[in-house]
Image (tube, rainbow, N blue to C red):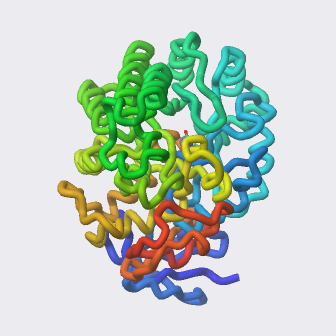
Amino acid sequence: MKKTLLRGGTLAETGKKTDVLIGITGEIEQIKPGADHKDAEIVDCSGKLLFPLLIDCHVHFREPGLEHKATMETEAASALAGGIGLVCEMPNTIPPTVTVAALADKVRRAASVDQCDLRFYFGVTEAIHLQTLRDLWTGESMELKRLKHHCCGVKLYLDHSTGDQKVDGGILEEIFTACAELKIPLIAHCEDSEMNAAAKKAVETSGHSASSSLPRGAHVSLSVSAHSAMRPPESEEKSIREAIAMAKKTGAALHIAHLSTSKGLALVRAAKKENLPITCEVAPHHLFLTVDDYPTLGTLGKMNPPLRTPEDRDALWAGIADGTVDCIATDHAPHTLEEKKTGDPLSAPSGVPGVETMLPLLLSCTAKKFPHPNYPLPTNHYPLTFSDIVRLCFANPNRIFSLGAHDIKEKKPARIVIIDPNTEWVLEGKNLKSKCGWTPFEGWKVTGKVERIICKG
Ligand code: DOR
Ligand code: ZN
């Protein structure tokens, strides 16, 4: 076995050109120009970027119970191909991850997944799950401590989505209080169930045009675009407002999942000004797609929260620019093409895959090439940098969920993505590793490609 010398790459975080020497145990021995290369396999990294293997703090890998859509193995391969080496996986599997046994089963399955580090959210929908969560967090047994290590926090659905895991509103304060006391990271899907139900009814009874929140472009393709009107922006706003109020009351640190609206973002911005421990993530599909994409995408553009207006998209980019947005996370949610495309469009499952396409989409932005084939750079588009990608897709999720992932540092395991920032290529579902075999970004030309990953430790 030989050492490996990554020669002449540029560290994405600092922009410094350097050599990285990796020992035979997989530990980084030296980071400096002209590192010792005796007996090492040399990898020429000139003109290449070195990123830490990235983190995606929001994925659905579907195992167990939904293996016809995806498995841990297929989606881990997809994540690694996209430069992601640690994922936080959601509890809406079958069975849902709401018991110690279900968590233990996921941890056991993940042990045979190569290279990609899987962590799991615990779901809480009723009081008994909360008791189990307390046991998990405070248990003294070796087994509970081992499982806790693989659990990255609690996921709350404030309205139903895939898997119907809406939390019992009566125990919400208790959950927030427990998370505050035990310092458990808390991530919430914020949509208001009553507002969503009312909007759905309004759209169904009086036709699409009755909705006050008719999204732009919705007229073009009535059927699936009605999904955006049925889960309106005001619903996300109300739910975020209430969740932040609950966090303030209880002292819990709260992370808002897949924030999608300008109004929701404004609430997070205000909470941060108050120094409340509120963080948020946005998803690539909300940064790159809008309601204007329904005519092209049909049900492949259906997800929860739904596609929003170009103004919302631009607000999310502004939120990245001013630091309100902490993370970009994919909400990778594979469904089969058949499930997406057959039957009534409004009954098609919500969710899109994303782990393999996030990095090339973001790299394209660093090259000032907004990758959408039909729309130019949004008006106030933020000039994303490589170090922003490290912050949004590694350092911040690592901190918020206490994941303990290693940056590119001496004496740490080498977990590195080598990127060619200049390669132009086309995203095509058939070439992606995700079991679902499709992408909402089909045919998009992107700039920047994962060339190789070094994945030790
Ligand atoms: O679009 C979505 N898909 N939103 C969710 O909340 C769940 C996810 C899934 O699991 O399919
Ligand atoms: Zn999700």
**In the image, residue 331 lies at what x, y percent?**
52, 48
Q: Work out whether 144 lies above or below 444.
A: above
The N terminus, quarter of image? bottom right
Q: Quadrant of residue 258?
A: top left
Q: Confirm whether residue 30 shows in the render.
A: no
- Left or right position of 107 against 215: right
Closest to the observer, 353 or 208: 208
For the point 50% across and 70% down, the residue is 417
Q: Is residue 355 left or right of residue 273?
A: right
Pick out the residue farthest to the front.
206
Q: Nearer the viewer, residue 136 or 295?
A: 295
Instruction: Please tell me which residue lies in front, 231 or 181.
Output: 231
Image height check: is 75 above or below 291? Answer: below
Residue farthest along the left direction in this orientation: 379
Residue at horizontal 70 percent and vertical 62 percent from the top? 74
Along the line of sight, the residue nearer the viewer: 333 or 43:
333
* Horizontal side of residue 94 vs 456, given as left or right: right
